[in-house]
Image: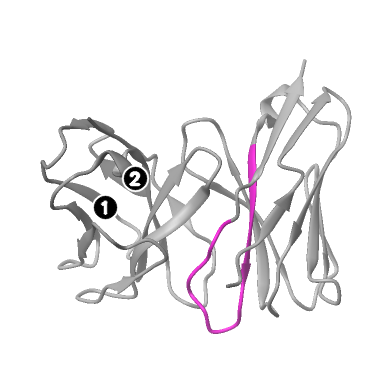
Amino acid sequence: SQQGEEDPQALSIQEGENATMNCSYKTSINNLQWYRQNSGRGLVHLILIRSNEREKHSGRLRVTLDTSKKSSSLLITASRAADTASYFCAPKKGGSYIPTFGRGTSLIVHP
Amino acid sequence: NAGVTQTPKFRVLKTGQSMTLLCAQDMNHEYMYWYRQDPGMGLRLIHYSVGEGTTAKGEVPDGYNVSRLKKQNFLLGLESAAPSQTSVYFCASIADGGKETQYFGPGTRLLVL
């Protein structure tokens, strides 16, 4: 299975702090995506990083990918209360069209 | 574009009743998916479709059937609902295999008594 496993399961921080969550996977991948899910809502795509990329930025988001360790990290800088959500990674093999998700990291940002 | 929509938003069933959840997308996407999400379990893939007229089983297909008669619609059926099927159901779609971003619907909350 190419399912990603997010770590930690839960993260609680104060507004303004940085939040880092990690994703590990078992098979070689073509790309890895991060999604956010606000409470009771569907998932929303945040960022995609390809296997030949090591780092990618989007606004306050920074994603890294280490294919040798089969891991990725998502950093949210200067967090806001509105960042409170669950975050999921979805590693994807080349030729596959079946994204699978782990249990996610539940992030709480206290105002 | 409305994106991905799901009908109904919430439903209560009694054990043994049947129902159909409808997922519709107006983005002309080829691939569509049904997931269920339970507390502490993340999203689990039930069934998926790679095009009109095709369906395939995912990780947890038992107790569910699907149909993709029209490209824009993906139906999930429960023939005889069980309390274990109480969950939040999400539909998602992808344009095609080369465009990897999934677009999700808002979810359907199902309670089976």
SS at badge 2: loop
The residue positioned 13% from the left and 52% from the top of the image is: B79
Left or right of residue B110: residue A69: right
Chain to which the residue tagged by mark 1 belongs? B
Tell which circle, 2 or 1, labels the residue nearer the N-terminal end.
2
Disc 2 marks which amino acid?
Answer: Ala
- The answer to whether residue B38 of the structure is visible from this angle is yes
Quadrant for the C terminus of chain A in the image: top right
For residue B14, which quarter of the picture? Answer: top left
- Looking at the image, which is closer to me, B37 or A29? B37
Q: Given contact means CB atoms under 8 Å apart, are the residues at marks 2 and 1 in contact? A: yes
Q: Chain of mark 2?
A: B
Mark 1 highlights which residue? B24
Q: Which residue is mark 2?
A: B2
As shown in the figure, which amino acid type bears the numbered disc 1? Ala
User: Do circles 2 and 1 both sit on a common chain?
Assistant: yes
Q: Is residue A73 left or right of residue B113?
A: right
Q: CA distance from mark 2 to mark 1?
A: 9 Å
The residue sitting at 49% across, 51% down in the picture is B43
Q: Which residues are magenta?
A: A86-101
Please indicate, yes or no, whether residue B29 appears anywhere in the rendered image.
no
Residue at x 11%, y 45% (from the top left corner): B18
Q: Position of residue B42 (x, y in %)?
A: 54, 48
Name the spot of residue B59 as percent of width and height, x first. Answer: 42, 65
Q: Magenta span has A20?
A: no
Image quarter (top left, top right, bottom left or bottom right) of the N terminus of chain A: bottom right
Residue A96, magenta (yes or no): yes
